[in-house]
Image (cartoon, grey):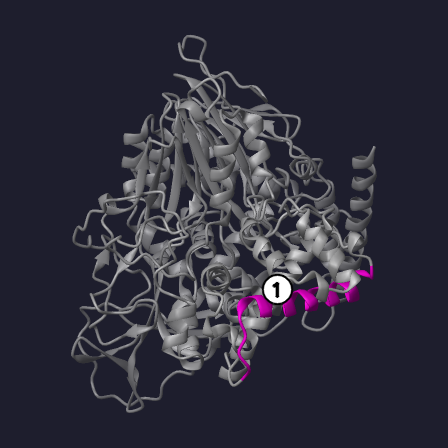
Amino acid sequence: MANKVRRAIHLVCSATVALALLLLLGAGHGTVPALGKALVPGGGIWASSSAQTTARTETLTLPELDEPVRVSFTAEGYASIEARTDHDVFLAQGYVTARLRLTQLDLQRRMGQGRLSELVGAAGVKSDTFELSLGLLRTAHARWAATPPDSASGRALTAYAAGVNSWIGTLEKTGEWPTIYGLTGVRPRPWTPIDTLVVQGVLTQQMNFNTIPLDYALLHRSLGRELTEEWFPVQAPTTQRPYDPGPYRALPPAPLTVPNANAADPDAPPAGTSTAPSSAHQGITLPDTVRQLDFNSNAWAANGPKVAGGGAMLAGDPHLQTTLPSYWFQLSLRSPGYRVAGGTLPGVPGVLAGHNEHISWSLTNAQTVGTLYYREELSPHRPDSYYWDGAWRPMEKAHYTIPVRGGATKNLTVDLTVHGPMMTVLGQRVSVNWMGNYAHNDLDALLAANRAHDFASFRGALRDWKAPALNFVYADDRGHIGTVLAGDVPQTPKGSRPWLPLSGTGAEDVVGTIPYDALPRAYDPPGHLVASTNQRPAGPDYPYFLGTTMNFDPGYRQAAIERFHTDRGALRTEDYTTLHNDVTDDLAVRLVPALLTALDEEELTGRQRAARDLLADWNHTMDSDSPAASVWWTFLDSYLHAVFEPWWDEKKVPADKDRWILDLDRSPIPLREALEHWTLDDPDNAAFTPPGGPHRDAPLVMRAAFRTAVADLTRQLGPRPSTWTWGKLHTREIPSITGAPGLGYEPYADDGSPWTVDAAGGDLNSSYGPSFRLIARWTGPGAGTAVAIYPGGQSDTPTSAWYDNLVPLWRDEKYLPLRPPKRPADTAATWSLRTGD
């Protein structure tokens, strides 16, 4: 009954938003033109409103298919495709995905291609300018040109595009376009393999593109080198436990095997002496959607005595922005070459995380260095040249036009050096060398992993995976588990400092990548557990540069996962659902005892004493009904500000340049780690004493921060500490990708924090966390169980029953069976699936 009431409210809100859009777009406003024709009864939005919103089980007989294909749906919308050829299975995947997610597909490719403005107007110009400058579209063209048509990826990309276009062709005949096209009159262009590669590049960028070297440069200018290296150390602290204990192989760097598709030709002749006027350069504002802002994902696997009944068990929950529709589209695929099920990326063939008949896998962001910046040597006398490898070189030019709906077309010129595009980012003019801009073929690796049958074939498939660098966690039907770090991790000459902008003269150019055989990995470790939570994957003696403390997670989620496996003994599927939803804050486990010791009860007021008692009785879980969780969170924020804000003010750290990395309100991870270490091991560290101020130590600052926290909570939540529940401060929401509030899942009080296994990243109103939960348990050859859930629905149409129907299940910690397509009756091995053990 409650779900029906909520859906009714949701539809009323959606209708209200739609009405407001009709009134605005019908009359026009500012740069938005009137769209009267789109609103004519019998066409435009009215036609889209009558479109089919929920697919049905059927046999597809599309003219593009070799043979009929069976497509079936569960009541919740999970789809299965059974085809007699590999060509047909990917064509049907494209068709089914477009049928339920066409708006999302088009918006994602428009974002990567720099063509959002054509649909949404001036609001898209900032994003389009950035994307065209960075060059996802240029890279996609280069990748497709380098893809052999008869390769696995070439055939899959062509078939997938044909499937998407088959659905677009159906809409052209019926006129039942999704609402956004009815409103704007814009129509989606035919899908191409290049569009798929652009969409793949968008996710790569959101997981792997960052500004860390530029942030280090800003800190060096303000804090100075000594404090920057002490508070934001390059080598991650030893508290980040590696999953590969070494010893490590020190092989020479491997060459990058494909060119940078967004760099000038290094073999071009030197520039002449022209002093022609330079094209105008503008600073690039970084939209929040274009780079990695939060840490991504948990994945773990156990075997042997840690699994009830033996065998192996795997769990994964990639952490991404939670949106309606989701990043994920759940599918099962069966053809002669593929029998695989799991989460797919809309727009891309194959399964990104899931299982086949013999193996299962999930993934986390490796967090390794993937973005390098170069300070090019420029001269006002050679305005369109740069100095590299002993000579002045001409900058190559890439010219673009950005059509803006309701406004004037924008012109953009991008300068390219041998390192990459020239951009002004965070106030620094640099060229950008990003691993996502290399013309490699990751899809071949993914499809090979979908077909793998054991750890050797799985690891062999991932040898060709290049970007983003990912940790793949593995379990199979023979009871084996493992991890593989796959991807290019660029290396620069010895003595260079790649965590800062590098010299563009050629002396600090990339010399290669970490060899695949030297990347961290593990297989059947003696502890019967592997886990990856974005922590540094190797110890301090690893011979290659992986990244800095800004790159890696501090390992609090890792500690909670390891402790769970130690405390619980032999585990079942339902135990992993519990761990997926665990909200233990391991930093609180470590620091709250020190805080309690520092507080002097005789100096506390009655309200402060009540807040202290809440912490003393607390189990360190960030439950929405826990007032102690609010006290802890507010104290830690106050503690960090009390220690570092005097330094930020004195040194004039430019937090406004990058609030996601440098703003103390975001609690930068290296500073939290430093604070933990000093509090427990170095309480008299000089950082506790503000510049020019009286001496302070950790207990003194903790007492002051606790008083500040209690005062802040009193102002926010009232005078009674017992009512300061975490849910009053902390909420989650699942917004619509359109930004329309009536089309999202509105904020609700919830558990978790950025550092818990059930993560809630970003701000106190979080829209970032477990975007897809997967559990696979193997009990013998070809036999196992699998369940999955994600916070969304299979359709991107708000009036569909499958728009957000999975969100309540995800909130209630419920999972659905993840069934692969049925195998032929004459096949000996079977896969028996059920919802529990």
| Membership of 724 in magenta stretch | no
Q: Is residue 546 left or right of residue 101?
A: left
Q: Quadrant of residue 605?
A: bottom right
Dot 1 surroundings within 10 Å: few (below 14), some, or many (20 or more)?
A: some
User: Vertical placement of 460 versus 284: above or below?
Assistant: above
Give coordinates of residue 617: x percent, y percent: 68, 46
Front in this rendered view, residue 373 or 243: 243
Give coordinates of residue 429: x percent, y percent: 39, 78
Counting every numbered tag in the picture gives 1
**In which quadrant of the rendered image does the C terminus lie?**
top right
SS type, badge 1: helix
**Residue at the front extreme?**
602
Q: Which residue is mark 1?
A: 637
Kindly tell me whether residue 351 is visible in this rendering.
Answer: no
**In which quadrant of the rendered image does the N terminus lie?**
top right
Kindly tell me whether residue 445 is visible in this rendering.
Answer: yes
Q: Is residue 375 left or right of residue 231?
A: left
Front in this rendered view, residue 417 or 766: 766
Front in this rendered view, residue 413 or 827: 827
Q: Is residue 382 left or right of residue 201?
A: left
Give coordinates of residue 306: x percent, y percent: 45, 26
Type of secondary structure dominating the magenta stretch: helix
Q: Is residue 340 left or right of residue 768?
A: left
Give coordinates of residue 753: x percent, y percent: 61, 51
| Membership of 696 in magenta stretch | yes
Q: Amino acid at mark 1?
A: Asp
Front in this rendered view, residue 613 or 435: 613
User: Vertical placement of 446 versus 453: above or below?
Assistant: below
Residue for point 30% across, 54% down:
540
Q: Which residues are magenta?
A: 693-719
Residue for point 57% across, 19% down:
834
